[in-house]
Image: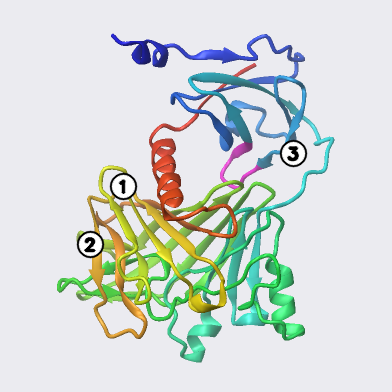
Amino acid sequence: MNSSHILSSALIVAGSLISLPAYSYRVEVSNPLPENRRGEIVEVPLKSLNAKALSYVVTDKEGKQVPCQITYDGFLIFPADVDSLSTAVYAVEEGKQRLDFPVYVYGRKFPERKDDLAWENDRSAYRAYGPALQKSGERAFGYDIWSKSVAYPILEQRFYDDHARHISFHVDHGNGLDDYSVGPTLGGGTAAFLDKNGHIVYPYCYRDYEILDNGPLRFTARLEYNPVDVDGEKISETRLISLDLGEWLNKTELSFDGLKSAKTLAQGIVVHSNNPTAYTVSEKEKFVAYQDLTEHADRGNGQVYVGIYSPGSSEFRFMPIDTEVRGAEGHVAAIANVRPGEKFTYYWGSGWSKGGVKDATDWNRKMSEISRHKKNPLKVSVKK
């Protein structure tokens, strides 16, 4: 056995001597990888604590308070810092947080802009189009991406400025902009079934929605879609989308009503004509990535980097567009097989060249890191 295997077989417990009051819980967070993990959101099941408590206080080994949030599905979440092959210890007490932490994760429906459902974290902002846009006849099927170069929330100000002050959010006024073109494509990571001829059956805008978590650490929304006809089957889709503080990608769980036989599901990123070969396919690490030059590349708006990590997909490839779409060559996609009664989970999201991503190489490195971390999650144990 070589030295690296010896190291990986023994986790070093950092802060193991932490002193906890009798009414506290000791939460141990272990990192199985030989690399540091910083600010990664971990989940503690409320059933392992006193689930009747209305609030909690989380502190690290030095007694410093850490922001936390109770989620709709029964978890206490907080950001953890864990060194390589180590275990970090946190204390959880019942009670009200003593500090006010800034909110970086936020979203809502914006009826002032055709029912956009928009949300953001400290990395990027996103929107899914709603029934008002569909009623208008505008063909925009996929997720839209808003770049940002600041950690604080920007959605409210951008929508207000655009709607009330006629200051366009398609222009960078110092913290980013919307210069990503969706159109009649899958945009920044939408999933859609393929019919028996291999053509994408595009979903349209969401029919209904519900916001389940709204910060400070996680945004979660459930979106329901109208039925689409896939080879004679009327299939209704539900998307459960969540975005955490510090994450480049949204986690999305799909479920389907009316699915009677196994179908092929593509999760795609639109490949635009101004950069037709700037995509990466990694079957080993289960991701696809793309460098988007933005809709107005000549304005110095930088590049938007888009990625999909899909652990349940078996094929990763470029798909030419199945209809003539001006400005798009096709999609780089992850392909999966979905069976009736199954749920399907994948991850999609973005970064910006003026907001923390140096270049395409750096984005691919980030996608590789995401793949490693999702395959080797931080492990949580709770002790009274």
Residue 153 percent across, percent down from the top left? 70, 60
Residue annotated with mark 1: 286
Quarter of the N terminus within the rendering = top left
Judged from this view, the residue extending furthest toward the bottom is: 136
Q: Residue at x 74, y 38 (%)?
A: 54
Which is more foreground, mark 3 or mark 1? 1
Q: Reading the chain from its start, which is encountered first: label 2 or label 3?
A: 3
Quadrant of the image occupied by residue 66: top right
Q: CA distance from mark 3 to mark 1?
A: 39 Å
The residue mark sitting in front, 2 or 3, is: 2
Mark drawn on residue 300 = none
**N-terminal-most mark, 1 or 2:** 2
x and y percent of residue 264 in the render? Answer: 22, 62
- Magenta part of the protein: which range? 70-78
Instruction: State the residue position of label 3.
Output: 54
Q: Which one is in front in this view, the residue at disc 1 or the one at disc 2?
A: 1
> Residue 152 falls in which quadrant of the image?
bottom right
- Residue type (three-letter) at the residue carrying disc 3: Leu
| Label ID, residue 264 | 2
Q: Amino acid at mark 1?
A: Lys
- Give x and y (percent) for residue 327: 37, 82
